[in-house]
Image (spheres, helix red, strand yellow):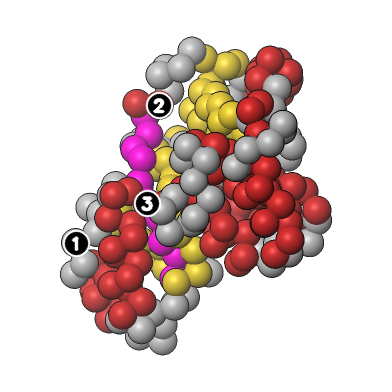
Amino acid sequence: MGFMSGHSKWSTIKRQKESKDAKRGQVFTKLAKAITVAVRAGGGITDPEKNFKLRLVIDKARALNVPKENISRAIARGGGGSQAADWAEVNYEGYGPEGIALIVEAATDNKNRTTAEIKNLFERGGGSLSSPGAVAFQFKKLGLITLEKKEDLDEQILKLMDLGVDDVQEASDVVEVYLKPESLKETRENIEKMGFKVLSEEMTMEPLNIIEIKEPQKAERVLKFTESLEEHDDVQKVYANFDIPDEILK
């Protein structure tokens, strides 16, 4: 219980950035890649009801108002045809400035190019890429469902805890429910039956140990580095184990 206190601030920053970025085309492009890769990873299954990973990405694309035709095009591209074969998911692990640990998930049609560019970003930012497995053990794979906050927050949190989930956190903008990945679908259905509004569901990697960054210059360097990774066209998600106190974030 409560093994992730404090990490929500980083996810909050990311969510706010995402909704701002959604106005830019880059988010659409990235989600289209994620859809294509989810179809490929699911053995070409284009039905979201039978391909869980695909369903998660499509839900996210809809939440960020990605046009329907973009979604259908991306599904078609994953399902076959000349472009499909080259798409793959690649994960990178490494350390950034201040010794923060990171996992970077990417979707690419040219692994060598992407690897070289990610390595370059790590080195420029004062970090280094590690070999696979070197960082992953410092994170735990979890499902994450975010909900709209209710007036009676305490009661909402108690009801959610009763579902046997790993953790419930209040973030500044939402309530976050962390749970075992395999119980994501069932828990989401139960939460909706309770009348709570689900805003998103996804797979996430939660750090087991948090590095607190308390000096403004260091915090700025860490955020700048993490953002440089997130802004790379092939990068889908960046997970990191740092936390920055609110007063420094401001």
Whether residues under marks 1 and 2 lie with C-beta atoms below 8 angstroms apart, the answer is no
- Residue beneath label 2, please? 136
- Residue beneath label 3, please? 143
> In whole angstroms, how far apart are the C-alphas of marks 1 and 2?
25 Å
Within the image, what quadrant is residue 168 found in?
Answer: bottom left
Within the image, what quadrant is residue 70 found in?
Answer: bottom right
Q: Which residues are magenta?
A: 138-147
Q: Amino acid at mark 1?
A: Gly
- Foreground label between 2 and 3: 3
Q: Earlier in the sequence, mark 1 or mark 2?
A: 2
Left or right placement of residue 158 versus residue 132 in this view: left
Q: Amino acid at mark 2?
A: Ala
Q: Earlier in the sequence, mark 1 or mark 3?
A: 3
Return the x and y of residue 9 as percentages of the image width and height.
51, 54
Return the x and y of residue 176 as percentages of the image width and height.
41, 62
Return the x and y of residue 25 as percentages of the image width and height.
80, 53
- Residue beneath label 1, please? 164
* Residue 141 is one of the magenta-drawn residues: yes
Furthest-front residue in this view:
81
Q: Residues within 10 Å of mark 1 (few under 14, many from 20)?
A: few
Left or right placement of residue 27 versus residue 48 in this view: right
Q: Residue at x 78, y 61 (%)?
A: 23
Left or right placement of residue 206 versus residue 115 in this view: left
User: Secondary structure of the magenta portion, mostly?
Assistant: strand
Q: How many marks can you see?
A: 3
> In whole angstroms, how far apart are the C-alphas of marks 1 and 3?
13 Å
On screen, residue 186 above or below 148: above
